[in-house]
Amino acid sequence: MKYRENQLLRTFVVRALSFSAAAAMTFNPAMVPAVAGDNRATTMPAAVDGQLNARFLALGVGKSIVIDLPRDIKDVLVADPKIANAVVRSAQRAYIIGAAVGQTNIVFFDSSGQQIAAYDIAVKRDLNGLRAALKQALPNADIQIEGVGESVMLSGSAASPIEAQQAGDLAARLAGGADKVVNSIAVRGRDQVMLKVTVAEVARSIIKQMGVDLSGSLNYGTSAVTFNNANPFTATGQAITSNSIVGSFGSTPSVQATIRAMESAGVVRTLAEPNLTAISGESATFIAGGEFPIPTGVTCQTTAAGSVGQCSPSIAFKKFGISLNFTPVVLTEGRISLRVMTEVSEVSNDNSITITGISVLSVKTRRAETTLEIPSGGSMAMAGLIQDQTKQAINGLPGLSTLPVLGALFRSRDYQNNQTELMVLVTPYIVRAVAQKDLSRPDDGFAAASDPQADLLGSINRIYGVPGRVEPVTNYRGTYGFITD
């Protein structure tokens, strides 16, 4: 009998402890956040005046979640079963299953009709596969993915614009189209690219002119014959030379001959080294040159009587010189996709025209445009821009100009040869900001000469030393302190 009492007492204690443990371990959904695709309950609403506020719950399509409630479930209300459904398998446990993308709500009631819990359900696309694909493709990027209805929103940060673009393309492929992806990825510290360009051009020109201007008057009784042969020099479009030798033969009749000859050779060297810096993905433009006026029309003033008054030409300005335009895109660390357009133009008298007494000049242009991929610090040369132009013209009197020896008196020769060669060197660098003390100016070390130095010694400036240059320690003799140029 005693053993029976002890056994009953032990059973009672065990049941009491089990009840206490169960009460202590009662699942509190308010302590667990809602995660789409998770199998845990979401935030449990708190009681407010005997009623329970609805809590938000996110689910993926085809995913489910387990809800444990504090009281027995008697009735369940699902607003739209096509979006989500609730399955009750036990008195205090329910399963919520996402069926289609959309929003609905689910309310649980007990046997007395009191509300136990209410949930606002948002069923979204299942993005776990997309998250895994982005993590595998871009392991160094910090990208968050959220579903907004049928669309996908990307946020977070990427190391370069290329990574952000790759993430957007991958999400568009997996989401079913680019119109379903909102790419809000920020680029961390966009790279800056400095482009160092060297434009070198050498132009050689040779001009040779030789001709004889003949004029004469021959009298035969009452008849007179006069002739005049002038050299047009048509190769250049105009007479360049003014060097001449004049000779006269006879008195009456008389013949006058002028020998016109010139030979010219010249070399023009053009060098420009512009440096430009631009953010990755942006464009930068540089031009070193000028503008020259060209007439574009005529503007006339109208008098008070309505008649046309004084007219003057309208002038516009056209740029010439050395221009550079480039757009860099940093692909990966140390590699740059570069679009470069460089142009060298100059004013020329060739092909110029004259309109109402106004000479309109022409422009010679050399242009190169390309897109390439190059590492930071690497160089690319655009060469082979060679032009060789030869003009030669022979003018003279028909028949007489072809005579041996004497034919040189009746013809002129105009020869012109132009050779130009242009080369462009392009070197991009990925750059960072530096302190001002690490930079130097062109006027560092410059000091104006004093009046006695300028008047007596002809000095223009004094140089006390270049910053950053360490001079060797040497004992000097005599006066020192500046160097005169």
Image (cartoon, grey):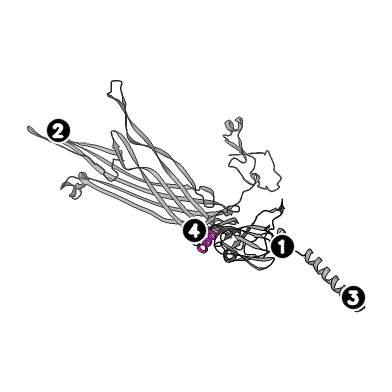
Mark 3 vs mark 4, CA separation in Å: 76 Å
Disc 4 marks a residue whose amino acid type is Ala
Mark 1 vs mark 3, CA separation in Å: 34 Å
Classify 10 Å Cα crowding around label 2: few (below 14), some (14-19), many (20 and above). few
Q: Residue at left 36%, top 48%?
A: 205
Mark 1 vs mark 2, CA separation in Å: 142 Å
Classify 10 Å Cα crowding around label 4: few (below 14), some (14-19), many (20 and above). some
Disc 2 marks a residue whose amino acid type is Thr
Using the image as rendered, state which of residue 108 and residue 130 is in the foreground. Answer: 108
Specify the quadrant that holds the N terminus. bottom right
Circle 1 or circle 2, nearest the eye: 1
Specify the quadrant that holds the C terminus. top right
In this rendering, would 47 be left or right of 61?
right
Classify 10 Å Cα crowding around label 1: few (below 14), some (14-19), many (20 and above). some
Disc 1 marks a residue whose amino acid type is Arg
Query: Which mark is first along the chain, 2 or 1?
Result: 1
Mark 4 vs mark 2, CA separation in Å: 97 Å
- Magenta extent: 163-179
Q: Residue at left 50%, top 54%?
A: 426
Task: Please name the residue that numbered disc 4 is placed on.
Answer: 178
Q: Is mark 3 on a helix, strand or loop?
A: helix
Mark 4 vs mark 1, CA separation in Å: 47 Å
Task: Please name the residue that numbered disc 2 is placed on.
Answer: 252
